[in-house]
Image: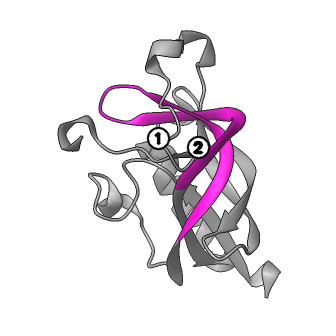
Amino acid sequence: MANEIAAMFAYGTLKRGEEREKFWPARPLTVVTAFTQGRLYELGEFPGLIRGEDRIQGELWIFKHRDIVRVIEALDVVEDYPRLYLREEFACETFDGQPISATAYVYAQPAKLTDAMRILPNEQGVVNWKPQSRL
C-alpha cells in the first residue's frame, strides 16, 4: 500500500478551512491531523516552515500515487516554487502515532527569518499556525 499513496504535509493556508484549500487539484483519499519536526515562522498572511526541533501540527493530505504529479504541479504555482518555497521530505506522525513520510513546502529564504517572526510552541509543546486575523 505504501507505494500506492503519496502524502503532502500542509501547515498553513492549504489546510482545511483556510484561504488556499481550494487550490488542491485532486480529491485526497483522506486528510488527517499530523505532526512533524521543524520551526514555523509568521510571514504575514502565511507561515514558513524550516528544519528544526519544534513539534509542528498540520495535516497530511493523502493521495493516490497517480494523482501526486498533478498535485505537486498545482501547488508549485501556489507556493511560488522554487523562489519562495522548496519541496522537502519530512518524517511525519499521525495524531494516533502512525509514521509516514510526506512532502512539505519549506521556506526558501531562511536568512530573512528573525526570532521575532518565530511561532512558539503552545503550553502543550505544539506549534499550530492560525491566520493573524483569527488570533
The kind of residue on which mark 2 rests is: Tyr
| Residue type at numbered disc 1 | Glu
Badge 1 crowding class, 10 Å Cα cut-off, few under 14, some 14 to 19, many 20 or more, is some
**Disc 2 designates what residue?**
105
Left or right: 52 as drawn, with respect to 19: right
Which quadrant holds residue 132?
top left
Mark 2, secondary structure of its residue: strand
Image height check: is 45 above or below 55? above
Main secondary-structure element of the magenta-colored stretch: strand
Question: Could you tell me if the residues under marks 1 and 2 are in contact, i.e. CB atoms within 8 Å?
Answer: yes
- Hey, which residue is sitting farthest left in the picture? 133
Which residue range is magenta in the image?
33-57
Where does the C terminus fall, quadrant-wise?
Answer: top left
Q: Position of residue 59 (x, y in %)?
A: 51, 63
The quarter of the displayed image where residue 50 is located: top right
Q: Nearer the viewer, mark 1 or mark 2?
A: 2
Tag 1 secondary structure: loop
Q: Residues within 10 Å of mark 2 (few under 14, many from 20)?
A: many
Give the camera-side residue of 133 and 8.
Answer: 133
Of the numbered discs in the image, which one, if any, rests on residue 79? 1
Q: Is residue 54 magenta?
A: yes
Residue positioned 75% across, 68% down in the render: 100
From the top left corner, tell me how far across and down residue 57 is, in percent.
Answer: 54, 54
Residue drawn 46% across the image and 47% down it: 128
Q: Earlier in the sequence, mark 1 or mark 2?
A: 1
Q: Is residue 116 magenta?
A: no
